[in-house]
Image (spheres, helix red, strand yellow):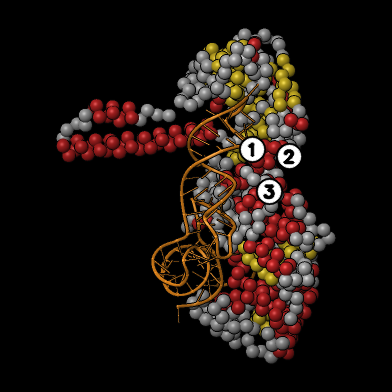
RNA sequence: UGGGGUGUCGUCUAAUGGUAAGACAACAGACUCUGGAUCUGUCUAUUGGGGUUCGAAUCCCUGCACCCCAGCCA
């Protein structure tokens, strides 16, 4: 892979560069990230954050953090804190430029009054239902409100009384007087203010009228003297009204530019739907490690660097797209491969007794902390007679291409010895393998044989007597389908019932005893894991961030699919047989069947 | 004949009239005390049809497909 010394460009940067060249904004670049505090940020926001903060940074400009808090009924101060934490965690900073749309309510009110005075806005009595009817449809023009031509004086008076709280919610709205026949629905006399007798988290009960997005947002940008106002594609239709307000008000005019939002396979990127999962108890909270939220990814073990790198790699364009989860996973593996210390941890333990190893002997063996980074040094791991290995690492009847432990077979225990399986102990009732007896070759201490003999597999292991118990939570994709929101029925019908698997019998090497919350490790041959905040003195809890690339798992999966196909084609053959019997009255020759089964030698 | 957008390998993104490039994925091989990492190689793309041009992903015409807009949400 080539180096990242030249960060890729995109059409947004091209626009900024051109504006810089033509001195459009006196050489300034000033962006903003304007979340509504009505939920937690997700990785789609991370993309927007990387664009807003990243472009400002790259061109020596500034980026404001601005909470777009114009709808008190949906917003919650809890989110304000979380959003700031997430942005900081990603590595961006807004300095002293933390703003709120509500900071500008007074100014916005004045601007609204100005529009009224210039005959460009009016107070409308139509109720919600009527407004909808008057608006027409996308194919048919709307019709003008009967209140559209009220006198300026009356409008001023009514609007003032709206502000004073003389009317109930919904009794009146302030609307821009534009064009009820505009082909752009957004221009059909859009609402500017609505009455909401609601307590606002910052302005308290000062206001009972609140500005609508289209009116508020362009003014927020204008007031902050933003140069480039980046937003997602669904606001393309809003650009006309954005420009209209600023032009009519004759104020500083930033440029709105739209880009495609991020979609990721097997998950959803909608704050509202994510909220539904949280409130419905489908996940354990906004920071559930299965969630695509920044806090969820953080808890899962993702690093900010990996997410920023991901956002760089996916690029920015205007075509709608859905990014493969594999790229996100690649980014976190790439990062953690370099940084995460290696340790040995057995997730599903199988007891191994080394018959020829002395009863009470314990050896301290050297293990490399990170082969990618020698400066991380080495550590000691204890070896003794009774060990745990992974259940997956033993097969009584090894299939083709399985080259781990099997009866009579020799493998290496990492940093320790070659061992050979000499006996398999099974539960009499279930037939399940409960323990293995092996012998070790003392001459292979450290993991190499002086006679040069090779083994095909190296297994990780943990000394039973020295092991630390832990709970490990394995995560899989949240949904079973690539694009749950494209389905006709409820997206929740496609939640993956296997998205969380909790393992409680895990055995870790003793160096992990004092692992602290947030620490990330590579469990050798298993994946990257990090310590979950649920950990206590009594029990360590780990989250699996991502598995290692696993060709063996792929081989198994392919074999499984082959088996399914085989079953299926066997079924088809049966049908063919039946058909043949029915049609000819003769039996299908057994030799033919044999021929089929021979051609199918599996695995 | 509503309007606004978008169509490039399986996926994401470049190429701005001049060799269709990169990343991820996939596949094959090398190496390996992690079936990890690393390295090498292979595979696959311009939405259809016309036109302009020496030359078109790019310009023109014309189809097609998909997304967004009818919240007192943002």
SS at mark 3?
loop
Do the residues at discs 1 and 3 belong to one chain? yes
Which residue occupies the foreground of this view, A397 or A434? Answer: A397
SS at mark 1?
strand
On the image, the x and y values in percent for residue A170 come to 65, 75
Q: Residue at x 67, y 21 (%)?
A: A415
Q: What separation in Å lies between label 1 and label 2 (alpha carbons)? A: 12 Å
Q: Residue at x 63, y 27 (%)?
A: A346
Image quadrant where one finds the C terminus of chain A: top left
Looking at the image, is A126 positioned above or below residue A268? below
On the image, the x and y values in percent for residue A25 come to 75, 71
Q: Is residue A158 visible?
A: no
Looking at the image, is B67 positioned above or below residue A115? above
Verify CB contact (< 8 Å) between mark 2 and mark 3. Answer: no
Q: What residue would you read off at disc 2?
A: A518
Q: Residue at x 76, y 51 (%)?
A: A91
Query: Neighbour class for label 2 at 10 Å: few (<14), some, many (≥20)?
Result: some
Q: What residue would you read off at disc 3?
A: A4
**Tag 1, which chain?**
A
Q: Residue at x 46, y 21 (%)?
A: A397
**Mark toward the start of the polypeptide (2 vs 3):** 3
On the image, the x and y values in percent for residue A258 come to 63, 65
Verify CB contact (< 8 Å) between mark 1 and mark 3. Answer: no
**Mark toward the start of the polypeptide (1 vs 2):** 2
Q: What residue would you read off at disc 1?
A: A544
Image quadrant where one finds the N terminus of chain A: top right
User: Toward which corner of the image does residue A587 lie, by quadrant?
Assistant: top left
């Amino acid at each position: 892979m080539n180096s990242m010394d030249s960060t890729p460009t995109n059409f947004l940067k091209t626009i900024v560069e051109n504006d810089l060249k033509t001195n459009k904004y006196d050489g300034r670049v000033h962006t903003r990230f304007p979340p509504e505090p009505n939920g937690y940020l997700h990785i789609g926001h991370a993309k927007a954050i990387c664009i807003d903060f990243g472009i400002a940074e790259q061109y020596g400009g500034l980026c404001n953090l601005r909470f777009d808090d114009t709808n008190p009924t949906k917003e919650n101060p809890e989110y304000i804190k979380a959003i700031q934490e997430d942005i900081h965690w990603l590595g961006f900073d807004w300095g002293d430029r933390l703003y709120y749309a509500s900071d500008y309510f007074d100014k916005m009110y004045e601007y609204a009054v100005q529009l009224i005075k210039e005959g460009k806005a009016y107070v409308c009595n139509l109720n919600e239902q009527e407004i909808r009817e008057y608006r027409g449809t996308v194919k048919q023009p709307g019709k003008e409100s009967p209140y559209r031509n009220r006198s300026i004086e009356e409008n001023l008076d009514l609007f003032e009384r709206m502000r004073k709280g003389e009317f109930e919610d919904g009794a009146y709205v302030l609307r821009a007087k534009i064009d009820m026949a505009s082909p752009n629905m957004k221009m059909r006399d859009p609402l500017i203010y609505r009455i909401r007798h609601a307590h606002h988290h910052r302005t308290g009960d000062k206001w009972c009228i609140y500005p609508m997005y289209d009116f508020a947002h362009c003014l927020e940008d204008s007031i902050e003297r933003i140069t480039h106002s980046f937003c997602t594609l669904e606001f393309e239709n809003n650009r006309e009204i954005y420009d209209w307000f600023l032009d009519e008000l004759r104020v500083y005019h930033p440029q709105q530019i739209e880009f495609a939002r991020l979609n990721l396979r097997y998950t959803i990127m909608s704050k509202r739907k994510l909220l539904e999962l949280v409130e419905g108890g489908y996940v354990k909270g906004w920071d559930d490690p299965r969630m695509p939220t920044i806090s969820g990814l953080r808890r899962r073990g993702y690093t900010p660097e990996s997410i920023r790198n991901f956002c760089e790699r996916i690029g920015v364009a205007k075509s709608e797209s859905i990014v493969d989860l594999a790229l996100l996973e690649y980014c976190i593996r790439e990062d953690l491969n370099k940084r995460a210390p290696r340790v040995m941890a057995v997730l599903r333990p199988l007891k191994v007794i080394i018959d020829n190893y002395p009863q009470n002997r314990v050896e301290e063996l050297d293990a490399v902390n990170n082969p990618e980074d020698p400066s991380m040094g080495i550590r000691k791991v204890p070896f003794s007679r009774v060990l745990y290995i992974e259940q997956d690492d033993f097969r009584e009847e090894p299939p083709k291409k399985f080259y781990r432990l099997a009866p009579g077979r020799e493998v290496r225990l990492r940093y320790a010895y070659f061992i050979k399986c000499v006996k398999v102990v099974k539960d009499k009732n279930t037939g399940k393998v409960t323990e293995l007896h092996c012998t070790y070759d003392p001459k292979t201490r450290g993991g190499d044989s002086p006679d040069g003999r090779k083994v095909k597999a190296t297994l990780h292991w943990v000394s039973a007597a020295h092991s630390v118990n832990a709970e490990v939570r394995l995560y899989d994709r949240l949904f079973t389908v690539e694009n749950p929101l494209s389905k006709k029925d409820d997206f929740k019908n496609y939640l993956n019932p296997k998205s969380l698997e909790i393992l409680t019998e895990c055995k870790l090497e003793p160096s992990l005893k004092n692992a602290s919350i947030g620490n990330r490790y590579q469990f050798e041959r298993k994946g990257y894991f990090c310590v979950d905040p649920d950990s206590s003195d009594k029990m360590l809890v780990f989250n699996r961030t991502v598995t290692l690339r696993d060709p063996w798992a792929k081989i198994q999966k392919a074999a499984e699919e082959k088996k399914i196909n085989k079953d299926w084609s066997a079924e088809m053959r049966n049908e063919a047989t039946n058909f043949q019997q029915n049609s000819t009255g003769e039996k299908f020759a057994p030799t033919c069947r044999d021929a089929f089964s021979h051609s199918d030698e599996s695995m």
